[in-house]
Amino acid sequence: MPEGHTIHRLAAEYGHAFGGGRPVRADSPQGRFAGGAALVDGRPLTSADAVGKHLFLGWDGVGWVHIHLGLYGKVRFGAGPPPPPEGQIRLRLWNDARHAELRGPTACALVTDAEKAAVEDRLGPDPLRPDADPDRAWRRVSASRTPVAALLMDQKVVAGAGNVYRAEVLFRNGIDPYRPGRDLTRREWDALWHDLVALMREGVRLGRIDTVRPEHTPEAMGRPPRVDDHGGEVYVYRRTAMPCLVCGDAVRTAPLAARNLFWCPTCQHRRDPPRT
């Protein structure tokens, strides 16, 4: 499932491609969003907003198209008007310069301002938004017996973080993923939050997740670069049984919160966060 940095990049690209007050054409070749597409067809896109893993495309006087990609959703942008549709395209937007095709989302629905606000109210703070309040997440974390690795995946606690970011930020801060949230210190939580903000901002900038520090890059260590469909250099994610880049111990994996968790049993036992 795409993590929050991908959704923020999509919001920026939609805004760049279809903003500026120009009319935007819309249709639903698949037919499942035909009514909503007809209501926004020919109107200018006035806003593109991302909150966690939720994308909202706004049209004044009509409402918001709420998109959640889920596990299988994808957006493809291209130059110029779209070619004849192929496959199951839920929503297609275009003008003379660009087109965008949305396929396979979990959600694509036209919602009101109040319904958009209701979705946002169910989410925890988004590290990529300037209005994020990490204290709100801390109040839930510090009162919970749930393992911190599960809390970081809970969108009601932190919006936008997914399996890659939760594994990597816990490793970078030396925190055992099974520690209950209430056993974290405020110093540890602040370090986790600030690290998550920095990593996700870098994800928006680069379009991939890179989490290793300069001394652990392939160039610095003389090792082959990582080959994975997610791209980027990471410490533990999908590195089961491989040597930890810091201590050499074998990276472990186990299911947690319906996803595979990855961690280093040697590096992730400290109670105080390392340097940032």
Image: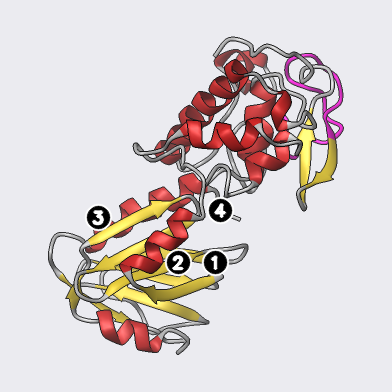
**Labels 3 and 1: the sequence-earlier one:** 3
- Provide residue 99's location: percent of width, then percent of height: 31, 69
Side of 23 where 112 appears, left or right = right
**Residue carrying label 2:** 67
**Tag in front: 2 or 1:** 2
Q: Can residue 127 be seen at all in this image of the molecule?
A: yes
Quadrant for residue 162, please give it.
top right
- In the displayed orientation, state which residue is furthest to the left: 21
Mark 2 vs mark 4: give the one in front.
2
Q: Which residue is mark 3?
A: 16
Tag 3: residue type?
His
Instruction: Give the distance between the C-alpha atoms of the residues marked 2 and 1, in whole angstroms.
Output: 9 Å
Using a 10 Å C-alpha cutoff, classify the residue at mark 3 as few (fewer than 14 neighbours), some (14 to 19) or many (20 or more).
few
Whichever of callouts 2 and 4 sits on the residue coming sooner in the sequence is 4
Q: What residue did someone put label 4 on?
A: 2
Secondary structure, mark 4, is loop
